[in-house]
Amino acid sequence: GAVVSQHPSRVICKSGTSVKIECRSLDFQATTMFWYRQFPKKSLMLMATSNEGSKATYEQGVEKDKFLINHASLTLSTLTVTSAHPEDSSFYICSARDGSVNTEAFFGQGTRLTVV
Amino acid sequence: GDSVTQMEGPVTLSEEAFLTINCTYTATGYPSLFWYVQYPGEGLQLLLKATKADDKGSNKGFEATYRKETTSFHLEKGSVQVSDSAVYFCALVSAGTALIFGKGTTLSVSS
């Protein structure tokens, strides 16, 4: 099946710094990528949807200036957590949809962010 | 809007027991339905899917049937193994939108 690679898998950063998370589709072109945040009680919250070459669409309540999303190519999307604070600590998961398939989405391995 | 409701759990079973995890959905269109599995510390993996009514998705002994009349997509397995211990998410997608997930059900299987 299609492979989505997310990097890094774990990162620890200091409060006030920024962290970039990469999401790559390895064997297909991802016209649309999604970023989710998973909270300790398992639920997945959709943060934003990004389409290649255009601005991301953020879900209500997600700060676009804090969570910068860039989808510059058909195989790469990045999420940058700016001026990170401990409450941003979470598990972030990206998902990519093959442009030729309207339904199925493939997930990266996730990134565990800890802000100290 | 569209939504997915699945049983909360945790579900605790002995090895070789029968598993059912209930999932119902609300959608305005004709969604595709999915079950994803998440092992500890990892991302989500697609377990099975069904794209239209009466379709049955199956994989690794797991099955789920798309029931439009009851708006359900219950996950079943006849004989669970310890290695099936994970969190299971029911999800739907319609009209090219992002997947909408249920809250996840933790399954714990003991030997």
Image (spheres, coloured by chain):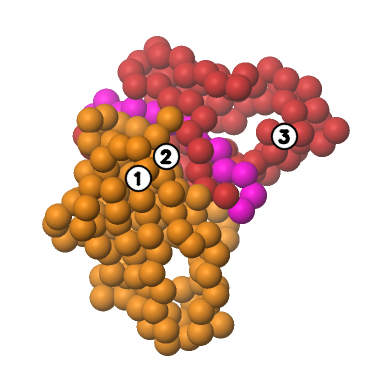
Residue A3's disc is 2
* Picture residue at 30% right of the left edge, 31% below the top: A103
Is B23 situated left or right of A35 in this image?
A: right
Q: Amino acid at mark 3?
A: Ser
Residue at far left of view: A54
Where residue B46 appears, as percent x and y from the top left, is 48, 34
Total numbered labels: 3
Q: Identify the image quadrant of residue A69.
A: bottom left
Q: Is residue A5 above or below residue B58?
A: below
What is the chain letter for disc 2? A
Where residue B83 appears, as percent x and y from the top left, is 72, 34
Is A65 situated left or right of B24 in this image?
A: left
Q: Is residue A52 above or below residue B16?
A: below
Circle 3 sits on which residue? B83
Q: Is residue B31 magenta?
A: yes
In the rendered picture, chain B carries what hue? red
Q: Amino acid at mark 1?
A: Ser
